[in-house]
Image (spheres, rainbow, N blue to C red):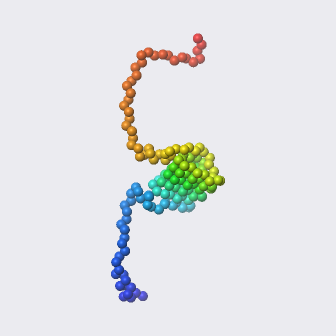
Amino acid sequence: MFNKRDKSTSSAAPLAVKPAKPIGKNMSQHSAPSILSGDLAVNGSITSEGEIQLDGSVEGDIRAGSITIGEKSVIKGEVVADTIIVRGKVLGKLRGRQIQLAATARVEGDITHSTLSMENGAFFEGQCRHASDPTGAAKKAAPKAATAPAAPPVTNVGTVAPPVMGTKK
């Protein structure tokens, strides 16, 4: 089955293997999306800096860089991401820079957005608000401002009694 000819070809130069990149904060830009399949039910919060494609159900809050909620998905909680595409059902708040509700979407909760688009047939019940920073990313990035010194106490020169309601003169 094996002969000398097969062994001589194995002496070729080994393939160059790239070293693994260290896992860091910027890995989400280069990694594949996290896919949660339809048979998965999560009871708790999900946090990712990258992209999530959700086809199962989640009872809890979701925070991600980008999320796509599939047609058969049911989310009971708040969804916060830069980009949110809803094709399924969300019972809770949506906060994102770009939010898209597909024709099959059903959202029961408030939406805070920079950009919102809805296809014909999408169901939305709640309040819709425009915000320049709906995800609150600027609050995290901005350093805390120093508190101003307390104002000097005001001294009263004279006091005036407020009128008493319900008394006749």
Pick whichever, 97 or 106, lies toward us.
97
Pick whichever, 130 or 62, lies toward us.
130
Q: Residue at x 46, y 16 (%)?
A: 159
Query: Residue 146: where, in percent of width, then height?
Result: 37, 37
Q: In the rendered view of the protein, which quadrant contains the C terminus?
A: top right
Name of the residue lying farthest toward the right: 121
Q: Residue at x 55, y 55 (%)?
A: 85
Pick whichever, 58 or 130, lies toward us.
130
Query: Residue 64: where, in percent of width, then height?
Result: 48, 53
Name of the residue lying farthest toward the top: 169
Q: In the rendered view of the protein, which quadrant contains the N terminus?
A: bottom left
Q: Quadrant of residue 154?
A: top left
- Asked whether residue 122 appears in the rendered view, the answer is yes
Q: Residue at x 52, y 44 (%)?
A: 131
90 relative to 2, above or below: above
Q: Residue at x 49, y 57 (%)?
A: 51
- Asked whether residue 77 appears in the rendered view, the answer is no
